[in-house]
Structures are given as structure tokens and as C-alpha cells.
């Protein structure tokens, strides 16, 4: 057997990558075999073949639990990107070159900013199945990194490492209060004013809350947060009920919320709202189409 034949025999295969990715995603060899439609020994052979060839442990087992080793964990985003691109190629070779079908999983932290963009994409690609979930920024970032979400609308100072994206809007972080609140008479409020307020905030994984509390720490202020909530709609409802005032992005406050924005006298209270995706997934057809729909931002 010559060297070319040996290289071909030992070549990394898509079948092996599919088996490995499925085991991690579904959590067992038997479930992976059922999903792919092969026998459990076949899945085991593919994984063992990879480990033997590269002399590297790829899976860690603890009781009935299976998890990726550090060596595999760093490669999983690339493996998933390869498999997604292969799926795109298969779709195009099946004469669906116009992106007539497919799916896109989206996470958003601020629906007022995300929904118009999602709606615009849907009008351009009505046959793409969209799954959109409201989540906190850090949860979205974690799910994109693990491959469970394709695109995210997140709030932060900058685009996370290993991600790519575009800036959707830059906006101040403000106090949201009823129109008749005494502080609305001020052009700006001080951190001393803020410290005395009962605050309604987003959950701890929220990008808005992280920026706000980091600024408060620098100002040597301890905000009095009386309740953490998962959505701006819930916060706005409680503001109207007189429970407290909210911390929000100025761009997410609308007239129908029954609230007004009050600026805090701190130039660092500025947040960027991005649309992000994994760099390795940028050429996947559905993600690329969404990127194109954002042109002009």
C-alpha cells in the first residue's frame, strides 16, 4: 500500500465527525446511534477510531454522563460549523440554491430591537423556519458558543471573543420611571439619587445590568435592587404599578410602556447592542442570509 492509499485510509471522515458530535449533543452512544440511524457499536467504532488515530481522549465518562475532554471542547464549534456547511452543500446539490428551506435559531435579549430585524428577514425568506427565544445576554452567548443558537441579539461593551457581528444600536442606560415621578423634573440625576431608589432590574446574566452595576461599583454606589425580572415588559408593568423604577436601555423604552427615560450623570453608562454569531459559522447559508439582511446598519 503506497503513502497516498494510507493517507486516504486514515482520512478524517464526516461520518466520524457526525458520530462524535451526536454523542456529545444527545449525551449517549445509544441515543446518538438512534438519531443517526446506525448501530451503537458503529458509533463506538467511529469514536474509538478517532481517539486511536490521534492518540487523544475525546470523551470523558462519569457514570452515565458523557462530556467532551478539553481537547474536544475547543474543537466542537469548528466541527459543528463543518457539519452545517456540509448540510448546506447537500441542500444546494438537491437543487435548493435559493435558500428555499432551512432553519435559524435566534436568541434575543431586547425584543424591541430584535423583532423588527427578525420580521424583516422573514419577509425576505418566508420558507426559513425561525425559532426565536427571549434570553439574557450571557445565556445567549453561552448557547451560541455551544451551538444551540445560531444568532444572538446581545448587549455589551464589545463583541465577545471568537464571535463576529454588527452593531445594531448604541444607547444610554437610563432610569425608567412614570411620567409623574419627582426625578423627571431633573435633566439628569446623580448616583446619590440612584442609590435611594427602589430598582427593578433584569436578571444577573443581563448585559444591561452588568454594565450598570459595573458603573455603580466605580462610583462607589450600591444600588437597591428590589426585584430582578426576565423581561422589559414585566419591569414596565411594575413601574406603572408604582412598585419601583427600572434600569433599562433608552432605546427599548416606547410610548406604550407608560414610562419616561431619566438620564444618570455618568458618561460610562452607554451600551452597545449587537447581532452576533460564531466566526466559524459565518458561511452557513441561513446565517449568511441573515447577515445580508442586516446590511446598511
Image (tube, rainbow, N blue to C red):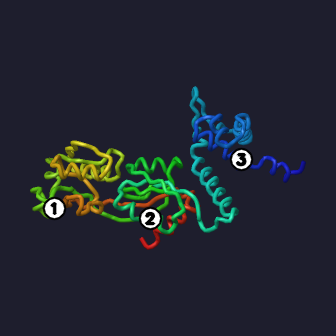
- Which quarter of the picture shows residue 38? top right
Label 2 crowd bin: few (<14), some (14–19), many (20+), radius 10 Å: some
Q: Residue 60 location, x and y as percent?
A: 60, 33
What's the residue at 57%, 28% (across, down)? 62
Q: Residue at label 2? A: 166
The numbered mark at residue 188 is 1
Task: Give me the C-alpha separation between circle 3 and circle 2.
Answer: 34 Å
Q: Is mark 2 on a helix, strand or loop?
A: strand
Label 3 crowd bin: few (<14), some (14–19), many (20+), radius 10 Å: few
Q: Residue 180 location, x and y as percent?
A: 11, 58
Q: Is mark 3 on a helix, strand or loop?
A: helix
| 215 or 101: nearer the viewer | 101
Q: Residue at label 3? A: 15
Q: Residue 14 location, x and y as percent?
A: 70, 50
Task: Give me the C-alpha separation between circle 3 and circle 1.
Answer: 61 Å
Label 1 crowd bin: few (<14), some (14–19), many (20+), radius 10 Å: some
Q: Is residue 252 above or below residue 196?
A: below
Q: Residue furthest top?
A: 63
Amino acid at each position: 500500500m503506497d503513502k497516498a492509499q494510507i493517507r486516504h485510509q486514515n482520512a478524517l471522515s464526516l461520518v466520524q465527525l457526525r458520530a462524535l458530535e451526536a454523542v456529545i449533543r444527545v449525551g449517549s452512544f445509544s441515543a446518538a446511534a438512534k438519531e443517526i440511524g446506525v448501530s451503537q457499536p458503529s458509533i463506538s467504532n467511529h469514536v474509538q477510531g478517532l481517539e486511536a488515530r490521534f492518540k487523544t481522549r475525546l470523551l470523558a465518562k462519569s457514570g452515565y454522563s458523557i462530556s467532551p475532554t478539553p481537547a474536544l471542547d475547543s474543537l466542537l464549534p469548528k466541527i459543528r460549523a463543518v457539519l452545517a456547511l456540509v448540510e448546506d452543500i447537500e441542500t444546494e446539490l438537491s437543487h435548493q440554491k435559493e435558500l428555499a428551506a432551512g432553519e435559524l435559531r435566534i436568541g434575543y435579549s431586547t425584543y424591541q430591537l430584535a423583532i423588527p430585524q427578525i420580521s424583516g428577514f422573514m419577509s425576505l425568506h418566508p420558507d426559513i423556519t425561525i425559532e426565536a427565544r427571549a434570553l439574557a445576554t450571557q445565556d445567549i452567548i453561552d448557547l451560541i458558543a455551544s451551538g444551540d443558537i445560531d444568532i444572538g441579539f446581545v448587549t455589551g461593551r464589545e463583541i465577545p471573543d471568537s464571535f463576529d457581528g454588527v452593531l445594531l444600536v448604541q444607547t444610554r442606560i437610563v432610569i425608567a420611571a412614570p411620567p409623574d415621578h419627582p426625578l423627571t423634573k431633573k435633566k439628569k440625576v446623580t448616583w446619590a439619587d440612584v442609590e435611594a431608589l427602589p430598582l427593578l432590574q433584569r436578571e444577573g446574566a443581563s448585559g444591561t445590568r452588568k454594565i450598570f452595576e459595573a458603573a455603580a461599583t466605580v462610583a462607589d454606589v450600591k444600588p437597591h435592587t428590589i426585584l430582578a425580572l426576565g423581561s422589559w415588559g414585566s419591569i414596565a408593568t411594575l413601574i406603572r404599578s408604582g412598585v419601583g423604577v427600572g434600569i433599562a436601555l433608552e432605546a427599548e423604552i416606547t410610548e406604550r410602556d407608560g414610562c419616561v427615560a431619566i438620564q444618570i450623570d455618568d458618561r460610562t453608562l452607554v451600551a452597545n447592542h449587537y447581532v452576533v454569531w460564531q466566526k466559524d459559522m459565518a458561511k452557513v447559508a441561513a446565517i449568511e442570509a441573515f447577515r445580508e439582511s442586516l446590511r446598511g446598519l
